[in-house]
Image: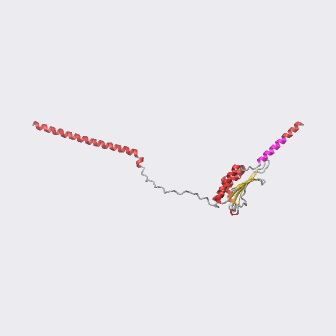
């Protein structure tokens, strides 16, 4: 009898653990606190520059809100908010099905907005996949994907021409730069070694010529003196 009770207890424990594990696997994880806070900061900057509120909302398959936030703060929605007459929001619903079910996991992502964005919503929604934010990304990391998608909206509206990009502020130069000196020819620099060698050879040749001329003049002078002496001796002999 005690053996049967032990077997039943083990089976109940195994079933309970399995059910708890399966339940945990069906829970849609929200974005981390860091992801939410960083997203709020980025959305706040975008809202100040573009005068558009941005937000996100992540729901479980049953309709329970897992996470929400906007440029107004974590947990604050931009929908019908008095501070947000113009707004855009990424709303994602993720549903994980148990392994025993024949149904597959699915993720649905839509972009909502105020009336002036009515004709841009579908294009904004389909453009999210260019940032890698497709259904697979929302199933793998729903918290990260929904916050990343909210930040991407501010880039997509600029691309769509809904708002103009912020002009880049550049400081004017204090004084006009002075013109650069005229660049000299590279002929001398590239052939400087060859030219120096050639110049040295010319100088040596000139020196040899001069020495040769001097020696030749000396030889001629010596010959003339010898000839005059010979003539003088010949005259004295006579």
Q: In the image shown, does 191 or 182 lie closer to the viewer?
A: 182
- In the image, residue 84 sits, relative to residue 209, either above or below, namely below
Instruction: Specify whether residue 5 is in view.
Output: yes
Q: Which x, y percent locates residue 110?
A: 72, 57
- Residue in the picture at 41% in, 49% down: 187
- Give the residue drawn at x 84%, y 41%: 11
Depth check: give the residue in front, 81 or 1. Answer: 81
Q: How many marks?
A: 0
- Name the outermost residue toward the front: 174
Q: Where does residue 3 sit, x and y in percent of width and height?
A: 87, 36
Queried whether the magenta region covers residue 24, the answer comes back as yes
The answer to if 201 sits in the magenta stretch is: no
The residue lying toward the viewer, choosing from 230 and 165, is 165
Can you name the residue that lies furthest to the left here?
238
Structure colour scheme: secondary structure
- In the rendered image, residue 37, in percent from the top left (x then y), is placed at 69, 51
Q: Which residues are magenta?
A: 11-25
Locate the N terminus by quadrant.
top right
Q: Is residue 133 visible?
A: no
Determine the image quadrant of residue 237. Answer: top left
Q: Quadrant of the C terminus?
A: top left
Dominant SS type (magenta): helix
Residue 41, position as x, y percentages in the image: 67, 53
Q: Residue furthest bottom?
A: 116
Q: Residue at x 40, y 48 (%)?
A: 188
């Amino acid at each position: 009898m005690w053996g049967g009770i032990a077997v039943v207890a083990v089976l109940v424990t195994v079933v309970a653990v399995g059910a708890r594990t399966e339940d945990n696997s069906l829970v849609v994880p929200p974005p981390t606190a860091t992801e939410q806070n960083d997203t709020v900061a980025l959305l706040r900057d975008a809202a100040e520059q573009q005068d558009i509120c941005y937000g996100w909302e992540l729901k479980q398959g049953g309709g329970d809100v897992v996470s929400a936030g906007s440029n107004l703060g974590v947990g604050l929605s931009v929908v019908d908010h008095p501070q947000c007459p113009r707004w855009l929001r990424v709303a994602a619903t993720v549903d994980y099905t148990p392994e025993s079910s024949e149904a597959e996991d699915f993720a649905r992502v839509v972009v909502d907005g105020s009336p002036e964005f009515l004709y841009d919503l579908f294009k904004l929604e389909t453009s999210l996949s260019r940032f890698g934010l497709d259904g697979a990304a929302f199933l793998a990391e729903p918290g990260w994907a929904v916050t990343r998608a909210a930040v991407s909206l501010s880039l997509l509206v600029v691309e769509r021409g809904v708002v103009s990009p912020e002009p880049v502020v550049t400081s004017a130069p204090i004084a006009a730069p002075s013109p650069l000196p005229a660049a000299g020819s590279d002929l001398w620099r590239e052939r400087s070694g060859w030219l120096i060698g050639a110049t040295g050879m010319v100088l040596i040749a000139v020196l040899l010529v001069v020495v040769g001329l001097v020696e030749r003049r000396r030889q001629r002078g010596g010959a003339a003196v010898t000839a005059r002496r010979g003539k003088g001796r010949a005259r004295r002999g006579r």
